[in-house]
Image (tube, rainbow, N blue to C red):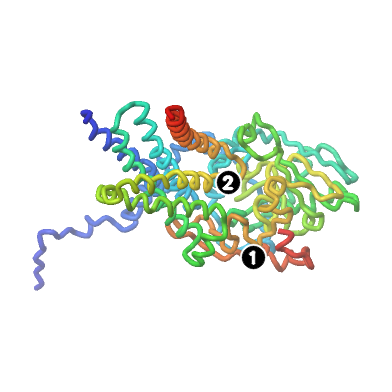
Amino acid sequence: MVPGYRVWWWSVFTLSLVPLAVLVARLLFGQLGPDPAEPITRATGLAALQWLLLTLAMTPLRKWTGRTEWMRLRRMLGLFAFFYACLHFVAYLHLIAGWQDLWGSFTRRPYIIAGLAAFLMLLPLALTSTRAAIKALGRRWRLLHRLIYPAAIAAWIHYLWQARADIGDMVLYGAVLGALLGVRLAGWAGAKMRIMTKV
Amino acid sequence: MLIRNKPSWHISHAEVTPEPVYLARRQFMAGTLATATALMLPASLLAEEKGLRSLSAAPNPDYSTAETKTPFSDVTRYNNFYEFGTGKGDPARYAHEMQVEPWFVSVEGECARPGRYNLADLINEAALEERVYRLRCVEAWSMVIPWVGVPLASLIEKFEPAPSARYVYFETLHDPAQMRGQRGRFSTIEWPYREGLRMDEAVHPLTFVAVGLYGRVLPNQNGAPLRLVVPWKYGFKSIKSIVRIRFQAERPKTTWEQMAPHEYGFYANVNPHVDHPRWSQRRERRLPSGLLSPNWMDTRLFNGYEAEVAHLYAGMNLAEHY
């Protein structure tokens, strides 16, 4: 273990709390504006997407740097993504949709269905993130956790479908997601090619 | 004889902080906090608020709601004015970059008196009135705003529209040098912003041209120096910073209708029974909304102006002509 790893872990942990801290600070200082529903829902949703992308960045970083410490941050980042997704989910229900007509809230609008799909895919990943679950599931754990790919894509679509007039931010996040998934596709394709050339 | 044995913790009344002082401390704290946050705002915004010229306008109670008004600070800091950015705070931050003096409005099309008019020649300040209207945004929030202005009908009659003029078309200033939102690379809006009304809607006594709010001239972020206010329609119909008015026979293509025709119609009448494809229109959050529990209220047909305007749409299927 590299010295200072604990410092790293705690730094990333603290940084991961920044979106929440900013939101709480704005709340306390009355800086959320006259319609807090909107900034609260937006900020938590954006943080969920950002931390999902950070989670997806850990494996490529391990490959490029050859250091395994990234993998130990991966679970924490993924759980933070789920944490913000939970806040986002509750904020939407409580502040935007309301608790009546839940079925309607989640089935009538495509962008909500995409968001809900992403959330439901993240749920089993969060539940099976314990050491015991990893052990118990064995090989199936890796298979299950590939759900993060469709979850991230669904989350991005959920974001894109909310664009009204300017899709600049959506394009930016899409490019990052595309790069992170593209790296994996290239890796798999490369591995297949090597196998095929050996045969 | 009564002998009082004062306990050790006793303090005399003279030492007790009087309640007003005690309460004033809270005010002081709140004030300090407000000052601290104000210091975080760009100086330009504050200067602009202070510099707004007062307007004298006679209140028009016949056309005013008695509902609680949305505070000036919310009305002027929470805006949709995509010419300055898509964030709600962007207009307050950047609209000072727009030059509103002098201001000219081009009047064109099927009317007897087309031309390029100076704003001062269009609005007679002696005729200004104040109307407190509900404003319902298509995004499911609403405000109550005291506007200062004149009925649009009084403006339209100056131009003597021809009988063939069945629609009125409006255009917002298009100048990327002054409007940073128009410089965005990924903006899907085709500038300038365009709106329109059917002639009978335009001359309806509720349809208003505002040049001010809260007794002062309009802050830039609210659509200075003149904007439309059509209280029974979603807010995006109330076009801001108008530079062009055209009378025409055919229905104009309006900006949002052009961008997303399945989401925004030409009429855009407030209607709780016709949902936006991406959200419900049954309720609205009246601003300022509660911090952790929204200030919900039921949205009313034609934003509560049904008695005045429903006849304009008699026989029309409002779900089809949304």
Q: Chain of mark 2?
A: B
Helix, strand or loop at mark 2: loop
**Residue on which disc 2 sits:** B79
Residue at image point 52% right, 46% down: A159
Q: Amino acid at mark 2?
A: Asn
State which tag comes first along the sequence, 2 or 1.
2
Give how far across and how far down residue B29 sits, in percent.
35, 47
Q: Quadrant of the N terminus of chain B?
A: bottom left
Q: Is residue B219 visible?
A: no
How many residues crowd mark 1 within 10 Å: few (<14), some (14–19), many (20+)? Answer: some
Q: Nearer the viewer, residue B261 or A126?
A: A126
Q: Is residue B111 visible?
A: yes
Q: Quadrant of the C terminus of chain B?
A: bottom right
Residue most toward the bottom?
B1
- How far apart, in angstroms, are the residues tagged by discs 2 and 1? 25 Å
In the rendered structure, the answer to whether residue A2 lies left or right of residue B175 reads left
Residue most toward the front?
A199
Q: Chain of mark 1?
A: B
Give how far across and how far down residue A153 sits, in percent.
49, 44
Residue at image point 65% right, 39% down: B188
Give how far across and how far down residue A58 sits, in percent.
36, 35
Q: Amino acid at mark 1?
A: His
Location of residue B194 by image quarter: top right
Q: Which mark is residue B92?
A: none
Q: Nearer the viewer, residue B155 or A172?
A: A172
**Residue on which disc 1 sits:** B273
Give how far across and how far down residue A31 sits, in percent.
44, 46
Mark 2 vs mark 1: same chain?
yes
Q: Nearer the viewer, mark 2 or mark 1?
A: 1
Helix, strand or loop at mark 1: loop
